Amino acid sequence: MLIFNKQYRAEEKIIAELAKKIKKAETLFMHTDGNAEVYELPGGMWISFNVVTYKIEVTIGGNHVIDFDCLFDSNEEMQHVRNKWFSVLLNDYARKRLEKIEKSKQKSTGLNKARKLILAKKSKTEEQKILEQALQQIKEL
């Protein structure tokens, strides 16, 4: 029973806190570093997921904080749980949050373009009205 294991509870709290940080991140940047997907969160926190060795590394402000070996081992219950955490953090939190932020950026960019087009059309319409009025005045002379 892992829930009675002190180490399990301590690691679970850390993983839950990382998930919370990712979920609440207003900005999230991802880059690759070899076999790792590195997610940069506000406050200088970086979470690195090595997808080959199944290792999570956390750094804050360039200082190493903690790492987890999450390589699956069917004979060791704790490794099985860590492997699940790795998958959930990477797929259900980091990648989905990044995708959501990117979609939000695209929508705001699209709205800005639409606004610019509307303003451009308005100004062209106004210009045309002014030109038509000028032409009308010239014709009346």
Image (cartoon, rainbow, N blue to C red):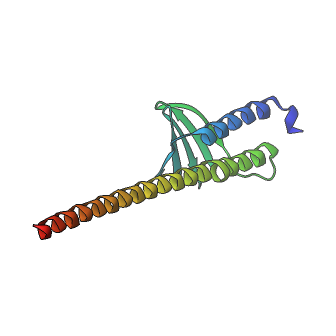
Which residue is nearer to you in this view: 81 or 128?
Answer: 128
Give the tally of numbered discs: 0
94 vs 129, left or right, is right
Residue under the point 14% across and 68% down? 140
Which residue is nearer to you in this view: 76 or 126?
Answer: 126
Which residue is nearer to you in this view: 37 or 139?
Answer: 139
Query: Residue 30, image x and y in percent?
Result: 49, 49
Residue 35 appearing in the image: no
24 vs 79, left or right, is left
- Quarter holding residue 68: top right
Residue extending farthest bottom: 139
User: In the rendered view of the protein, which quadrant contains the N terminus?
Assistant: top right
Query: Residue 103, image x and y in percent?
Result: 53, 56
Compared with residue 59, is residue 135 higher up or lower down, i.e. above or below?
below
Which residue is nearer to you in this view: 84 or 100?
Answer: 100
Residue 57 appearing in the image: yes
Residue under the point 39% across and 58% down? 113
Query: Residue 100, image x and y in percent?
Result: 58, 52
Residue extending farthest front: 141
Compared with residue 101, is residue 136 higher up or lower down, i.e. above or below?
below
User: In the rendered view of the protein, which quadrant contains the C terminus?
Assistant: bottom left
Compared with residue 47, is residue 124 higher up or lower down, i.e. above or below?
below
Residue extending farthest left: 141
